[in-house]
Amino acid sequence: MSDKHYTLFEEQQNQRGINLNNVKDKLKQLKVETPSWGFGDSGTRFKVFQQEGIPRDPFEKFEDAAQVHRYTGMSPSVAIHIPWDKVDDYSKLKNHASSLGLSVGAVNPNLFQDDDYKFGSVTNTNPSIRRKATDHLLECVDIAKEVDSDIVSLWFADGTNYPGQADFRQRKHWMEECLQEMYGSLDDHMRMLIEYKFFEPAFYHTDLPDWGMAYNMAMKLGPQAEVLVDTGHHPQATNIEHIVAYLLDENRLGGFHFNSRKYADDDLIVAAHNPYEIFLILHQIISAEDGTDVKASKNAANIAYMLDQCHNIEPKIPAMIRSILNVQSLYAKACLINLEELREAQKNQDVLAAEQTVREAYECDVTPLLQAVREEMGVPVDPMKAYRESGYGEKILARGKGGASW
Ligand code: AFD
Ligand code: MN
Ligand code: MN
């Protein structure tokens, strides 16, 4: 049955000038990291709904994350957040991860939950609080070294609520100073990703509100600093794919935090809203990878894809599987854009043909392709169903309520 569908699909794609073997290879290489905090209890400022079966410690978070990888074959690493995932012995965590077929991914410092950080962390007017924040950054670099991770991923809640509350330029200098010190502690192969967000928790100004300021910071720090794009961190109607193309061209696109939003930083299942946006972002990456600009192509091949989601009302593990599959399916569609045809249409200034070339790929049903790829990867053709039927979701209920939360 699925063979017949695949053969038909292959014929159609051949006619469109697409070589499916290349597409399959790309799909097999696509990996998306899951966030440890996405397995813990979470909520909004109004309420955290506790779920039964939530992991009670970082080790159990990795066990749940292993389920996502087991059914998708696509998420072999897990990002950690410190101190949420603080343990006495990080080599134990690393070994636990590898016994589950996983590795520890990006290390995320937490500079927003300590009382000291009420008026900022690396931008605080109090030098001893800036020292404390910098020490935490250095601690996270050390943890990354211990767990063999080459990424430290930075997000700052620093900002102000009222005009006149603080001196923007002064804070900029302080942030630069702290990040310089952290940069100096990186090993050569390590990368430091700088995430931006235009508001929340601060409502008047955020110290790193947009990609331009994050990019400028990365440029000042050096080649091991790159920009991280969290899809939920932009004002409405921002053209994220353009930002992505620009950063690729500047060779500073470090990674993604995928998630979906309707209004603000909603952290919903990626592509639950506006899947076309994710498709267009992935298209920019594939187009750079396939293009003649060697540096952009290298950058495109070296992006850290991660999820940054908090599933407040739905069960965590299947929500994570759903998210990974959504990225996979949109990536598959983006691979089906005939880039030669597109470049030809662009050269000829044929607006309708160019738009059609992009949209027609999006409209393809990629189910037979994904099923074939999963079969070849040795994972279930229907990962959601296989997880549901595995009984793991029921088994973990024995953990009870009151697991880890942020
Ligand atoms: C924030 C940022 C950042 C941070 C996370 C913490 O997206 O990635 O680490 O949420 O929950 O909004
Ligand atoms: Mn994020
Ligand atoms: Mn966010």
Image (tube, rainbow, N blue to C red):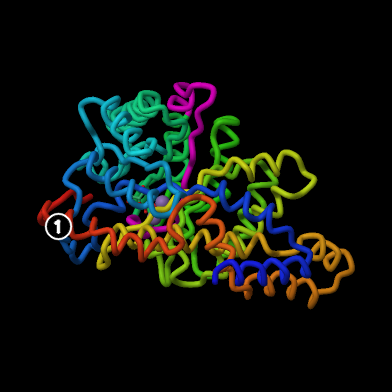
The secondary structure type at the circle numbered 1 is helix
Tell me the chief SS of the magenta region: loop
The answer as to whether callout 1 falls within 8 Å of ligand 1 is no
Magenta span of residues = 180-203
Of residues 270 and 216, the one nearer the viewer is 270
Q: Does the magenta run of residues contain 235?
A: no
Note whether 62 is above or below 379 in the view shown.
above
At 62% from the left edge and 64% from the top edge, which residue is drawn? 280
Q: Does the magenta run of residues contain 182?
A: yes
The residue at the far right in this view is: 348
| Residue 377 x %, y % | 51, 50
Note whether 180 is above or below 157 in the view shown.
above
Residue 127 shows in the view: no
| Residue 264 x %, y % | 40, 66
Of residues 112 and 145, the one nearer the viewer is 145
| Residue 290 x %, y % | 73, 49
Q: Amino acid at mark 1?
A: Leu
In screen coordinates, is 37 left or right of 224? left
Note whether 110 is above or below 162 in the view shown.
above
Quarter of the view holding residue 57: top left
| Residue 109 x %, y % | 34, 38
Q: Which residue is mark 1?
A: 397
Decide: few, some or many residues near mark 1? Use Cα within 10 Å; few <14, some 14-19, many ≥20: some
Residue 187 shows in the view: yes
At 38% from the left edge and 45% from the top edge, which residue is drawn? 156
At 47% from the left edge and 24% from the top edge, which residue is drawn? 186
Numbered marks: total = 1
Specify the quadrant that holds the N terminus.
bottom right
The residue at the far bottom in this view is: 352
